[in-house]
Image (tube, rainbow, N blue to C red):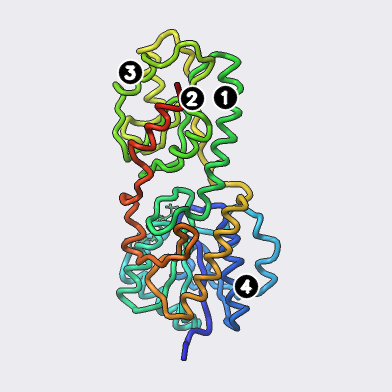
Amino acid sequence: MNKIKNIGVLTSGGDAPGMNAAIRAVVRAGIYYDLKVTGILRGYEGLVQADFIDMDRKSVANIIQRGGTILKTARCDSFRTPEGRKKAYDNLIANNIDALVVIGGDGTFTGANVFIKEYDFPVIGLPGTIDNDLAGTDFTIGYDTAINTVVSAVDKIRDTAESHNRLFIVEVMGRDSGLIALRSGIGAGAEAILIPEVETGMDDLISRLEHGRKDKASKIIIVAEGDEIGGAFHIGETLKDKFPGYDIRVSVLGHIQRGGSPSCMDRVLASRLGVIAVEGLLNGHSGEMVGQLDREVVYTPFDQAIKHINIEEASPAWLKLIEILSL
Ligand code: ATP
């Protein structure tokens, strides 16, 4: 007989559009299966501080369309310590919480993995991050919205770039992963995309610009913040020296990439995976992220899910598309 009666749910790490849709799905699935659902505020910080709220059907009404997370999120240093995790465990036991759904990215799953090894406590993860940098799911919750936000911002930048014959360097989020830059760059018709996974180098970029068509009214270069060349402003300065004839501008998109109403794709992904997470816990799953690969639901152990280096998309083959398409 399954002993799970009360499921805790939290959002952790960077916020992502669709986290609310995921919370809603976990709460409604919990109620559907006659469980109590406890909301944990501010990620692992709320676990350590016992900041808990009872969730009911109405507490997740009218949130599927909202960006951010109603449970708030935080980075929590004390959960990185054995003492902090002990407090978290004691709080779970004291509040009769039998299992957890954690919604977040690789750091969140790394923390959950350490916790499970110490306390053998059931935890399922939902991929909630704009970065799409998790193995075991084609897309993470929030990624689709974020790349659409970037594309719509770059479309606007393109209008002004065309009018002034400017070259724009647009920096997008992605400290370790270039997947936001990659898809949004293709979608926005960029001339070049610079991502941390593939070493392009300034010489390559200069050569691309030297050999590219000179008669284009505007050029857009998309750079992931973690690219090894060193940020949009640095690239801008170097290109200004090399191409004094270019009118070069830099735009750092920043936090607008996290906000906004989630796309339908993100809402559906969050809704489906949220329900499966609760069902997975009831069926004895733990220590795994629930993802979707080729439309199928897939459970991936946390230590595998966080290996984003295995994601093939951030590759020279994808960047070649840009070389061909920007002719
Ligand atoms: P995003 O990728 O969107 O930023 P994330 O889940 O990777 O999301 P992090 O800030 O890296 O965000 O991690 C969230 C939290 O997970 C940390 O604040 C910390 O509390 C916990 N955590 C991360 N790594 C560990 C670890 N090695 N041990 C224990 N806890 C950890």
Residue at the image position 47 percent from the left and 39 percent from the top:
183
Where, quadrant-wise, is the C terminus in this rendering?
top left
Residue type, numbered disc 2: Ile
Q: Secondary structure at mark 4?
A: helix
Does the residue tagged 4 have its C-beta within 8 Å of any atom of ligand 1? no
Left or right relative to 291: residue 153: right
Q: Residue at x 31, y 36 (%)?
A: 198
Mark 2 surroundings within 10 Å by alpha-carbon count, few (fewer than 14), some (14 through 19), many (20 or more) = many
Camera-side mark, 4 or 3: 3
Image x and y of residue 130, in percent: 49, 49
Left or right, residue 327 beside residue 41: left
Residue on which the image places disc 1: 158
Res 28 label: 4
Residue type at the position of mark 3: Ser
Q: Which residue is mark 2?
A: 220
* Mark 4 vs 2: CB contact within 8 A: no
Question: Quick one: label 2 or label 3, which is nearer the N terminus?
Answer: 3
User: Dot 2: what SS?
Assistant: strand
Q: Residues within 10 Å of mark 4 (few under 14, many from 20)?
A: many
Q: Which residue is mark 3?
A: 207
Q: Work out whether residue 79 can be spotted.
A: no
Marks 1/4 in contact by CB < 8 Å: the verdict is no
Question: CA separation, marks 4 and 3?
Answer: 55 Å
Q: CA distance from mark 1 to mark 3?
A: 22 Å
**Dot 4 amino acid type:** Arg
Q: Are marks 2 and 3 in contact (CB under 8 Å)?
A: no
Res. 235 image quadrant: top left
Alpha-carbon span between mark 2 and mark 1 = 7 Å
Q: Residues within 10 Å of mark 1 (few under 14, many from 20)?
A: many
